[in-house]
Amino acid sequence: MRPLATGETLGAFCLTEPAAGSDAAGIQARAVRHGDCYKLTGTKTWVTNGSAAGVLMVFAKTAPHAGGKGISAFLVEPGFAGFRVGRHEDKMGQRSSPSVEILLNDCLVPVENRLGEEGHGLKIALSALDGGRIGIAAQ
């Protein structure tokens, strides 16, 4: 977290998925705990700075049948096994800020990289989005 706070590295926010669109509770990415790590599987789209980020906040379901209450948040690094940057979205504007697809194929994430408790991810995501809306409005 310190490299993010000091500006040494960029972060990225991975919530949007191809089938869920703006329905954050409808994401399909899964996180299954295996001992001291989670295996994350899924696809995230329109990830701003996803190809340049040193750490990505990824949201995935740890309890798929619990709806929004089953979503958890994880800090994922590009070097983790099972992590891959996919398609680059060719935008009309803001080309200095790449938007990409993030592919998670049994991406191994240490348990200590979970943010908060299991099932608190949607609250974390919505809180982050609220803060971002202020910046967007200021533009």
Image (cartoon, rainbow, N blue to C red):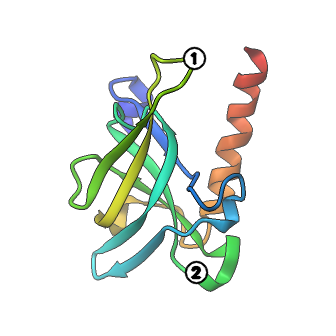
Q: Amino acid at mark 1?
A: Gly
Provide residue 103's location: percent of width, then percent of height. 36, 55
- Give above or below for 136 relative to 84: above
Considering the numbered disc 2 on the image, is that residue within a helix, a strand or a loop? helix
**Nearer the observer, 46 or 60:** 46
Contact between marks 1 and 2 (CB within 8 A): the answer is no
Q: CA distance from mark 1 to mark 2?
A: 36 Å
84 on left or right of 121: left
Provide residue 114's location: percent of width, then percent of height. 43, 62
Q: Nearer the viewer, mark 1 or mark 2?
A: 1
| Residue 113, quarter of the rendered image | bottom left
24 on left or right of 82: right
Q: Residue at x 35, y 52 (%)?
A: 76
Tell me the number on the disc at residue 60. none
Q: Residue at x 48, y 53 (%)?
A: 44
Q: Amino acid at mark 2?
A: Pro
Provide residue 27's location: percent of width, then percent of height. 60, 65
- Give above or below for 54 relative to 97: below
Task: For the N terminus, give its image quadrant.
Answer: top left
Q: Which residue is mark 1?
A: 93
Q: Residue at x 39, y 30 (%)?
A: 10
Label 2 crowding class (10 Å Cα cut-off): few <14, some 14-19, many 20+?
some
Provide residue 28's location: percent of width, then percent of height. 55, 69
112 on left or right of 65: left
| Residue 21, quarter of the rendered image | bottom right
Q: Residue at x 58, y 51 (%)?
A: 16
| Residue 138, quarter of the rendered image | top right
Q: Which residue is mark 2?
A: 64
Label 1 vs 2, first from the N-terminus:
2
